[in-house]
Image: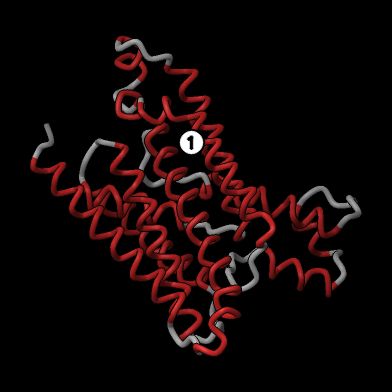
Amino acid sequence: MKTAASRANVRKLLVMGALVLLACAAYLTVEVNPKYFSFAMSLRVPKLIVMLIAAFAIGMASLVFQSVINNTIVTPCLLGMNSLYTLIHTAVVFAAGSGSIQSTLTRIMVPNEYVNLLATLVASFSNVNASIILFSIVVLAAILLALRRDLALLDVLTLGKAQAVNLGVDYDRSIRRLLLGVTLCIAVATAVVGPISFMGLIIANLSRQLLKTYRHSQLILGSVLFGMLILVAGQLIVEHVYSYSVPISVFLTVGGGIYFLYLLLTRRKV
């Protein structure tokens, strides 16, 4: 039987879902000339799908990661996964292998190649790689299928290893599988849009603050919906208010940095 708090959370999630649908509809239709509707959709639909994929992957991965390590102010990106992506991508663009670290490679890189590299190291939805959309969806679906039982055990896993083992859970196996799933989700999100450092921190903590529950089925869904709303609405503003002059990653980095400091200060006071 659902409690009053659980029913209230369901209503909040439904409202968030409606806001996401409204943002998606606005993104697809704002300032679209009916004469060129098909052409506009051919450009906007792939970008919208990529945003939803990235939000789903980052939202789920960040909240699961925080629960597994029992720390709500750390995300996979803050622990260096984006830096690893940057280093690997730099090495691939450089394509010579003479440098051992990222800074060395970028110093001796040809200027034109370095400019092209910088464009790929900033999260952007202006030029999405539509060819990997289907592959990304398949990978995320496979992750969900493989981890469905481990995700269902998250409420128990967060009680601690001793409690989980006493309840019959193979704690170490579930943790390893979940961390592998987190890594793959972040890899998918980074592959489709590039690194977004503070995205996971923002949406995972907003979900916890809004829903105030231990049920990870609701928390994960809230994190995903927050991600979709922020990315779609943010990209809508970037395109139609700022005319692409400022990428959405700039707003996420500035806002995420401020929010991170807020979490640190409020956590210290508790």
Q: Position of residue 85 (x, y in %)?
A: 67, 51
In the displayed structure, does residue 171 sit left or right of residue 101? left
Q: Please tell me whether residue 198 is drawn above or below residue 64 in the rendered image.
A: below
The residue at 50%/71% (across/down) is 248
In the displayed structure, does residue 227 sit left or right of residue 44? left
Closest to the observer, 125 or 160: 125
Quadrant of the rendering where the N terminus is positioned: top left
Closest to the observer, 89 or 141: 141
The residue at 57%/79% (across/down) is 38
Q: Which residue is labeled 1 in the image?
A: 144
Q: Position of residue 212 (x, y in %)?
A: 20, 45
Q: Position of residue 267 (x, y in %)?
A: 27, 48
The residue at 34%/10% (across/down) is 168
Q: Position of residue 36 (x, y in %)?
A: 57, 86
Quadrant of the rendering where the C terminus is positioned: top left
Closest to the observer, 84 or 174: 174
Q: Residues within 10 Å of mark 1 (few under 14, many from 20)?
A: some
The residue at 14%/49% (across/down) is 8
